[in-house]
Image (tube, helix red, strand yellow):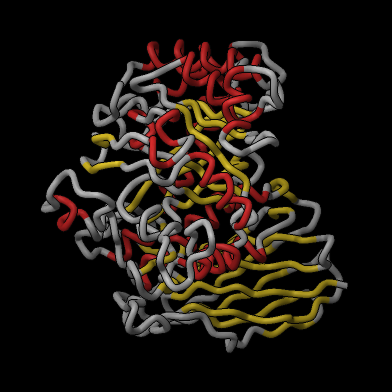
Amino acid sequence: MEKAKMTVDKDFTIGEVDKRLYGSFIEHLGRAVYGGIYEPGHGSADMQGFRTDVLEMVKELQVPIVRYPGGNFVSGYNWEDSVGPVSERKRRLELAWRTIETNEFGFNEFVDWAKKANSEVMMAVNLGTRGVDAARNIVEYSNHPEGSYYSDLRIKHGYKQPHGVKTWCLGNEMDGPWQIGHKTAEEYGRTAAEAAKVMKWTDPTIELVACGSSHLGMPSFPDWEATVLDHTYDHVEYLSLHQYYGNPDHDTPTFLARSLEMDRFIDTVKATCDYMKAKKRSKKTMYLSFDEWNVWYHSHENDSKMDPWQIAPPQLEDIYNHEDALLVGCMLISMLKHADRVKMACLAQLVNVIAPIMTETGGASWRQTIFYPFMHASVYGRGTALVPLIQSPKYDTKQITDVPYLEGIAVHNEEQGEVTVFAVNRHLEESLPLEVDLRSFGKCSLIEHIVLEADDLKASNTATQPDRVVPHRRGGASVSDTLITASLAKASWNVIRLKVQ
C-alpha cells in the first residue's frame, strides 16, 4: 500500500484539550443505574449499594464528568421524587422508555456515586413537562449553602454541604417529536433563556448548556441552532450536539467513514454559533458540548419486542464488536481535531446501556471493545491538540468519497514531556505504512505502541470471553530523532506514545 504521512509542529496548535472531553452519561434507562452502577446485595456492593467492580472500571477510564439523569428520561422527571427518605419516594410511570421508575436511586445518591468515581456531575433539568420554577429550585437545593427552603431541605436530607454542581443542561433534545414536551425552536429558546436567567440568579457560578439539534439528520438543522442561540446566546456557555452511528447494512467501509460526517456536523454548528456571535456583536465565543455520542444500532430489534412497564429491563444493550471500537476511535479523533471549540463530550452511556462497561445482574462485569480507545484517549489524550497535516491514500464508498485510510491526531502533554499519536487504519485488508514527522520537538524516544486489532471485525467481548478483543503493546513503531515509522495493522486502532527531550 502507498505510504501515509502525518506532520505535526508543536507551535501549530488546535487548542487545549479540556479534560471534560472524556465525559460520559448515566440515564435512568435500562440497567444503567439498577444493576449497573447500583446493585445492593451484589458481592461487590459497598455500604451505599454501589458496585465497586464497576467503580474501578470507571476509574480506569478517568471520566471527569458524567451527565445525569437523562436523556429522554429528564423531560418527564420530577426531581423532588428522587430525594428524601427512600421509603417515601414515589414510583412513577416513566413514559420516555415505558418502564417503572422506583426512584430508589436519586439525585443525592448520584452525587455520592460521582464523588467515588472521581467525577463531576453534569445535571440536566426538565424543560419538557416542567420549566423555570423547577429549574431554579433544584439549583437552590443543590448549590445554595443554607437558610432557604430548598437548601434547608437538602440539609434535612443529610447533606450539610452544598453539592456544588457547576454544569447544567437546559433540557434534552427538545427538537425531537419523541420528546416529552417537544417544543419548536422559538418555544424552547424562550423557555431556556428564562430558565437560564433564574438558575444563574440562584447561583452565578454555574455554566449552562443549551440544546442543539438531536442529530445531524434533523430537518430543522441548523435553523434550530440559530433560533435557539438568538434567545440564549447571552445566557449560556455551551450548545449541545448529539450523534449516533450504526452499521445495519454491514457496509464497514462506509461505517468507518462516518466520522467525516461528524467533522462536518461540528463545523456547521461552529459556523452557526459564529454567525450568531457576529449578529449579536458579542465578544463571547460559544463552545460546544457533544454530550451524546456513540455507536448504537445492535439492540434496536430486541428493544422493539420488549414488554412495557418493567423495572430496569435490559434496554439498549448493544454488544460491541471490533469495527465499533474503530469508529469510536475515529470519533474521538474528530473531537480532538475540534478541541478549540468542543470542550465537553459524553460517551453515551457508561454502563450496560450502549456502554463500554457491561454487567450481569448479580454477576460479572467486563469491558466492551469500545472501552479501550475511550480509555486510551482519556488517559493519554490530555494536553494540547496539534494540527495534523495528513497525506494518505484514499477510498470511495457508495455514500462517502475521498475517505483517507489514515485517521489521526497528535496531542502534546508539555507537563509530562510526552507526545501521543492516535491513529486508525481504515483499510480492511492491508497494513498501512506510516511516517510521523515531529520536526519541531527535537529528539524523541518511543515509550510504547499500543494496538487494538482483531482478525474478525465482528469479534466481541462477553461475560464468558471478556478478553477476546483487547489491546497489545507489540505495535513495532520505531523512532529516529524526530521521525516515527510504523506499520499500522489492517483495521486497527493505534496509540504511539513518545517521550520528548
Residue 241 position within the rendered picture, expressed as x and y whole percent measured from the top left: 46, 37
Q: Residue at x 29, y 29 (%)?
A: 179
- Foreground: 339 or 234? 234
Answer whether residue 193 is visible to the viewer in this image.
Answer: yes
Q: Residue at x 43, y 64 (%)?
A: 356
The answer to whether residue 265 is left or right of residue 494 is left
Answer whether residue 258 is visible to the viewer in this image.
Answer: no
Q: Residue at x 56, y 68 (%)?
A: 56
- Foreground: 248 or 348? 348
Residue 53 position within the rendered picture, expressed as x and y whole percent measured from the top left: 50, 70
Q: Name the image quarter holding the C terminus.
A: bottom right
- Answer with the quarter of the image where residue 156 lies: top right
The answer to whether residue 437 is left or right of residue 303 is right
The answer to whether residue 170 is left or right of residue 309 is right
Residue 9 sits above or below residue 97 on the image = below
Q: Residue at x 11, y 53 (%)?
A: 305
Residue 134 position within the rendered picture, expressed as x and y whole percent measured from the top left: 47, 19
- Foreground: 399 or 135? 135
Residue 266 position within the rendered picture, expressed as x and y whole percent measured from the top left: 50, 39
Residue 452 sits above or below residue 143 on the image = below
